[in-house]
Amino acid sequence: MTVLVADVGGTNTRIGLADGGAVTRISRYENDVYPSFDAVLTEYVSQLEDVSFSGAVIAVAGPVTSDRASLTNRNWRFDSGRLAALLPGTGKVHLLNDLAALGHALPDLAEQQIATLLAGSGQQINTQQLVVGVGTGFNVCLLRDGVVMAAELGHASLPSNVQAVLVASLGRRAEMFPTNEAILSGRGLSRLHKAMTDTDMDGPSIISATGVNGCDVATETVSLFARVLGCFTRELVFQYLPMGGIYFAGGAARGLLGSNARHDFAAAFLQEGAFYEQMAQIPVHMISDDQAALTGAARYLGGR
């Protein structure tokens, strides 16, 4: 049984074939090159020979409603019926939020696919796990007892105490960041640097400029971003109680938490005080495998 699986982000798309759980023949596409996901899918399928699909799962970085979805940070629309017509075979096309796909992937991730940032105390009052995606956009997904619960938290307003961290450094320019995704994303990192320095710089360039002999202003930007993320992650703990662990995903999170700024994140997350022990109990990890959402998409269909 061959299933097509795809992970469609704001910047890149990955497509592969799942058969018996393993995902193979993975190709990566830059979204800027294509007018729609339909065009990406058509190109991928054209490179295959004698393949008939029993189904497909498309993980999308945006809201999903039944058989339709849209990308939050790109004007792409998805219709499961239209997409099924592009695939050889008679299987149904399932649409899934990309963070939900990562939630489905968690049970199958091996040790080498995860980097531990904070080990936690090992004292768990529940097994709830939270995936936090910081990439082109922002979102979360809760996993509880094998049940994946999708959300669209990127569009929610930034909590007041997190906003206060920005106000202390930016003054009135903090008003540039009204929602979670406006700051907690790769584009948010670029906006933050613009607010702090009046210069334009993309997220990866900002992070790479913060080496041992790096740019001081870039280091200040990344440090503030890490502190904001740490404070915000505390809020997520109060909302979701993910005592089974927090799992970050996405290019912006990987770049940030793989740099020296991870210490700023940890300090803001743990914060000495009334809730230090509660925060210290929770393990914090980074999903280091870019293809994890494809694994989750395959697992989703296998569990239906």
Image (tube, helix red, strand yellow):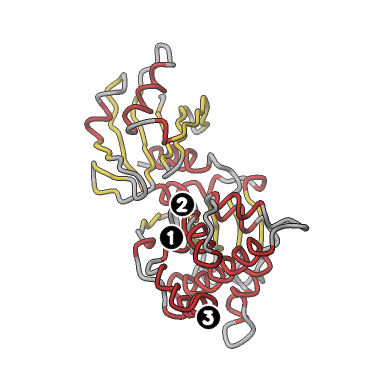
Choose the circle earlier in sequence order: 2 or 1: 2
Do residues under tags 3 and 2 come within 8 Å of each other at their CB atoms? no
The amino acid sitting under disc 1 is Leu
Residue 17 appears at what percent x and percent y?
A: 46, 27
Farthest residue toward the right?
Answer: 212
Q: Residue at x 49, y 52 (%)?
A: 135
| Image position, residue 120 (x, y; %) | 65, 68
Where on the picture, by quarter, is residue 123?
Answer: bottom right
> What's under tag 3, amino acid-wise?
Ala
Q: Which residue is mark 1?
A: 142
Label 2, secondary structure: give it.
Answer: helix
Quarter of the image where the C terminus is located:
top left
Q: Residue furthest top?
A: 50
The quarter of the displayed image where residue 207 is located: bottom right
The tag on residue 284 is: none
Q: Is residue 96 left or right of residue 220?
A: left
Q: Which residue is mark 2?
A: 103
Q: In the image, residue 250 lies at what x, y percent?
A: 52, 50
For label 3, the residue is 168
9 on left or right of 54:
right
Q: CA distance from mark 3 to mark 2?
A: 35 Å
157 to the left or right of 21: left
Q: Secondary structure at mark 1?
A: strand
Mark 3 falls on what kind of element?
helix
Q: Residue at x 52, y 69 (%)?
A: 233
The residue located at (43%, 43%) in the rendering is 9
User: Of circles 3 and 1, which is in front?
Assistant: 3
